[in-house]
Image (spheres, rainbow, N blue to C red):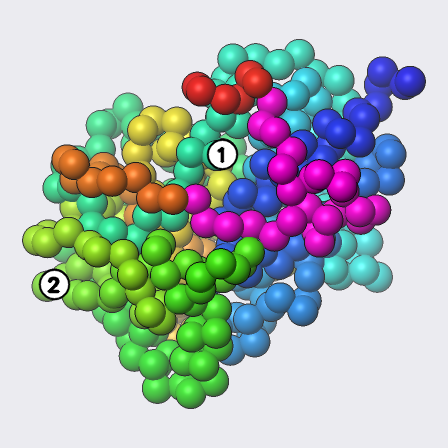
């Protein structure tokens, strides 16, 4: 055995945590390959949402989230990831080639990886409670460490512009029959390994200047009443190349896992950035032209007494890892050091 190379079980255990990453409509548009020396992450074009995501922006962001989840999981298991992003222009679907090298695991590695199975995409109203300044600093730094910027939107003009962009995007999408059919096909799921389960979706409601969540079909989650106290943030990158979009996903993962580690609830929202006009509105009126907006992250606290959400399902590892995963891969245990933390 070469102790400078990870064994297949370790890699597959890391991938099992990586695929817990959020993705647009829980489409899980990724494929993984382990060669014995490197791990490859590829986009799965068959899972691209042709109406909501015609240019593949959300697909790349989703895969970036999974890539960062993988590096976090590997670090907790004693392997540092050397990531080569978009390594071959002749293979645009090859998003990253990762080499794992021995690494001395730190407490912070374990704490961040332990947040992976705890994180949920929570679309409910949050408690009307401000973030601690310390937590804002941690969230911003987590994005900056991934070459992105996290802007907290906390003044009336920019909040108005952001909610207007969301409302306009929602209206344009609802007027598009192809989009509504696609959304219905990917939501309201029951007993499915992908898509948005009915038990994790809320009916879209707007009160005043609140951000409207996406209109998922057959929503079965009961939301609270009153004002939504979620803190709205916009994650942006310097440009809008495929690499920027992939990095935006990595930054989103870092923000979400940091929020979970800080006992915050969170949810990613991308609908305003799926249309050129509403993305430009956010760029110009929320970011003042500084950076390219890639997604919104809602963060905050659950109201007192609110029940935790169940985990959304994931596809079996045998469907996403090649060569095929361990025959019991779908049930790979989370390493002991990541449980109960």
- Number of numbered discs: 2
**Which quarter of the rendered picture does the N terminus lie within?**
top right
Q: Which residues are magenta?
A: 311-335
* Residue in the picture at 80% in, 47% down: 324
**Residue 173 sits above or below residue 316 on the image:** below
**Kind of element beneath mark 2:** loop
Q: Name the residue beneath numbered marker 1.
A: 116
**Which quarter of the rendered picture does the C terminus lie within?**
top left
Question: Could you say where residue 291 lies in the image, as x and y percent from the top left?
Answer: 44, 53
Question: Does the segment drawn in magenta span residue 218?
Answer: no
* Residue in the picture at 24% in, 27% down: 133
Q: Nearer the viewer, residue 219 or 30?
A: 219
* Residue in the picture at 25% in, 66% down: 204
> In the image, 95: left or right of 37?
left
> In the image, 325: left or right of 281?
right
Q: Name the residue beneath numbered marker 2.
A: 207
Res 94 quadrant in image: bottom right
Question: Could you say where residue 301 lies in the image, as x and y percent from the top left?
Answer: 23, 37
How crowded pointer 2 is (Cα within 10 Å; few <14, some 14-19, many 20+) is rated as: few
Q: Nearer the viewer, residue 25 or 194?
A: 194
How crowded pointer 1 is (Cα within 10 Å; few <14, some 14-19, many 20+) is rated as: many
**Kind of element beneath mark 1:** loop
**Residue 237 sits above or below residue 209 on the image:** above
Question: Could you say where residue 83 lies in the image, as x and y percent from the top left?
Answer: 71, 37
Mark 1 vs mark 2, CA separation in Å: 32 Å
Res 176 quadrant in image: bottom left
Question: Does the segment drawn in magenta span residue 316?
Answer: yes
State whether the magenta stretch is mostly helix, strand or loop. loop
Residue 74 in sight here: yes
């Amino acid at each position: 055995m070469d102790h400078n190379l990870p064994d297949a079980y370790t890699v597959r255990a890391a991938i099992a945590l990586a695929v817990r990453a959020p993705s647009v409509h829980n489409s899980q548009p990724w494929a993984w390959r382990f060669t014995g020396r490197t791990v490859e992450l590829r986009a799965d074009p068959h899972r691209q949402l042709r109406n909501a995501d015609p240019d593949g922006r959300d697909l790349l962001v989703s895969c970036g989230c999974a890539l960062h989840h993988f590096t976090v999981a590997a670090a907790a298991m004693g392997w540092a990831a050397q990531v080569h992003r978009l390594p071959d222009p002749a293979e645009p679907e090859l998003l990253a080639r990762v080499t794992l090298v021995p690494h001395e695991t730190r407490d912070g590695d374990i704490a961040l990886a332990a947040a992976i199975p705890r994180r949920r995409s929570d679309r409910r109203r949050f408690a009307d409670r401000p973030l601690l300044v310390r937590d804002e600093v941690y969230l911003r730094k987590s994005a900056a460490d991934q070459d992105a910027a996290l802007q907290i939107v906390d003044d009336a003009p920019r909040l108005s512009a952001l909610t207007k962009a969301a409302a306009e995007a929602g209206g344009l999408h609802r007027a598009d029959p192809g989009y509504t059919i696609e959304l219905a096909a990917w939501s309201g799921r029951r007993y499915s390994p992908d898509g948005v389960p009915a038990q994790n979706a809320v009916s879209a409601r707007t009160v005043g200047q609140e951000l409207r969540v996406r209109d998922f079909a057959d929503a079965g989650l009961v939301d609270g009443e009153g004002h939504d106290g979620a803190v709205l943030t916009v994650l942006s990158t310097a440009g809008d190349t495929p690499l920027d979009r992939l990095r935006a996903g990595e930054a989103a993962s870092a923000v979400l896992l940091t929020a979970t580690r800080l006992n915050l609830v969170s949810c990613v929202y991308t609908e305003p950035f799926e249309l050129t006009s509403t993305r430009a509105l956010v760029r110009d009126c929320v970011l003042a032209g500084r950076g390219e907006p890639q997604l919104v992250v809602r963060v905050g606290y659950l109201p007192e007494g609110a029940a935790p959400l169940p985990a959304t399902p994931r596809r079996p590892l045998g469907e996403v890892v090649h060569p095929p995963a361990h025959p019991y891969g779908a049930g790979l245990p989370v390493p002991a050091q990541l449980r109960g933390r």
